[in-house]
Image (cartoon, rainbow, N blue to C red):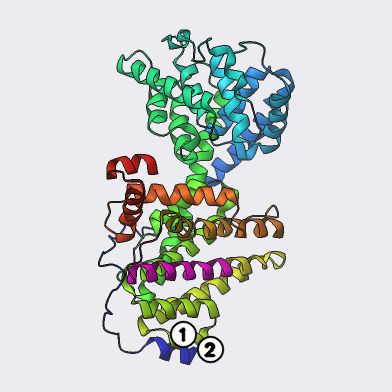
Amino acid sequence: MAPSKVAAAVNGQKPMVPNIVQSSSTLPPVAGSDEEFAPSASEQRMRERAERLKAQVRQTFDAASMDVAGLVTYVDTLERLGLDNHFRDLIGGALDRIRAEELPEHGGGLHVVALRFRLLRQHGIWVSTDVFDAFRDDASGFCSSLCSDDDPRGLLSLYNAAHMAVPGEMVLDDAIAFARGRLMDILRGSKVRSPVSEQITRALDIPLPRFTRRLETMHYIAEYEHEEAHDGLLLELARLNFVLVRALHLRELKDLSLWWRELYNTVKLPYARDRMVEIYFWTCGMLHEEEYSLARMFFAKTFGMVSLMDDTFDVHATLDECHKLKEAMQRWDESEVYILPEYLRMLYIKTLSNFKEFEEILEPNKKYRMAYTREAYKLCSQNYLKEAIWSSQKYQPSFKEHEELSIMTSGLPMLTILTLMGYGDEATPEAFEWVSSVPEMVRAGSQVTRFLNDLSSTYNMQIHTLILKIYTNEHAYAVGKAQEGYA
């Protein structure tokens, strides 16, 4: 489509605000800032110092000379300090040994046994819950001796490890209940010192395996200094690494804010959420390491455009406009801009142009990835339209129907593909095929994402209240009870 035609298509008189059929709700703005963040003038010197420290860590990381208990502790320290991405090869070798060599009976106590269990499961290595049998009594409960105030760290490790459970592992369910109750008693009695007290408080709020890693690193760097046996080399490297990664994040946020401001001001959709800072925070929660910079930028930009489309379907467009927007997205051609109402034309044009820019950035052997991303984007518009139709027709889906659609409209199936788009060679065509099939792992993540989002909602949007209404109707529960079961 020629530029002059594009301009003519989008520069017409602003249309009247259409009747809203989906929802009378409004979306609150998300606070943000376009402040430009500049890296520190000493960043290069810090980076050089960090490289020297990495070399020293490699020289001192002698897995062969450590016992399994020491190795487990060292690997956990690297991960919680946010340094594991610099030593993946060393950690991989260490995990092989940790898996192959069993701890001696009661070796290292509950803390080390639970820590080993959690580390291996976090890395996809299966460990039987039998490792906890030595800490259980004949009544199949955990030993009362574990209630000793002398070992709060062991109880904390057990509590965190137990959250690596899969459905049906009653031993770990019991461990969570047991450890949580005792840890709360310890905190109430003020019988534990810093930094363990802070770590217990944090875990009782959000267990370590579910905590955002970048935030955990921020906390743990401050706490690690107070560990009696802390490694000064690791501590200095962790501090430098945290500052260097933060500097990169700030530069990315600056670039994204400028990009978003131009997009947001161009498409002129006042009903849509201004939420790039929120999106970038989420992005960093998944991928904070330096090497994933391109993945973060692709993810945040595409997520931002999806958000504009989602808000259009959800709270503003008429049903007829929803059909037209979905149809235009399926055709994916600028010449189709004329089927859209004037206020949506620039959104369509900017979406297509941004996708072209993304493709130009990709290396020649990775350009095939854009086809998967486009198809995922098109599928999103189809599912958003289905939600709009349900709302317009006041259709009352079953819980199963709603769940199936919510898995797709959660955005996670598409966002998983977006994440891979900026990866290196490890993201193969086979990986894209697998993720595009919405495997069980993606489905489960989508369920958690959507259900927790619905439960934490302030219920300003009709679609957010619908799921609880459906659940209560089908199960004859009160709302409070439904929230418990739904969680």
Circle 2/circle 1 CB separation < 8 Å: yes
Q: In which quarter of the image is residue 361?
A: bottom right
Residue 292 picture location, percent across and down: 58, 51
Of the numbered discs 2 and 1, the one sitting upstream in the chain is 2
Q: Residue placed at 57% from the left, 28% from the top?
A: 118
Q: Is residue 200 above or below residue 44?
A: above
> What type of secondary structure mainly makes up the magenta span?
helix
Residue 83 picture location, percent across and down: 58, 36
**In the rendered image, is residue 425 in sight?**
yes
Residue 320, label in figure: none
Q: Which of 52 and 102 is in front in this view?
A: 102
Residue 337, label in figure: 1
Q: Nearer the viewer, residue 472 or 130?
A: 472
Residue 1, label in figure: 2
Look at the image and give the residue range highlighted in magenta. 374-397
The quarter in which the C terminus is drawn is top left
Does 174 appear in magenta?
A: no
Say which amino acid is labelled 1. Val
Say which amino acid is labelled 2. Met
**In the rendered image, is residue 287 in sight?**
no
Q: In which quarter of the image is residue 201?
A: top left
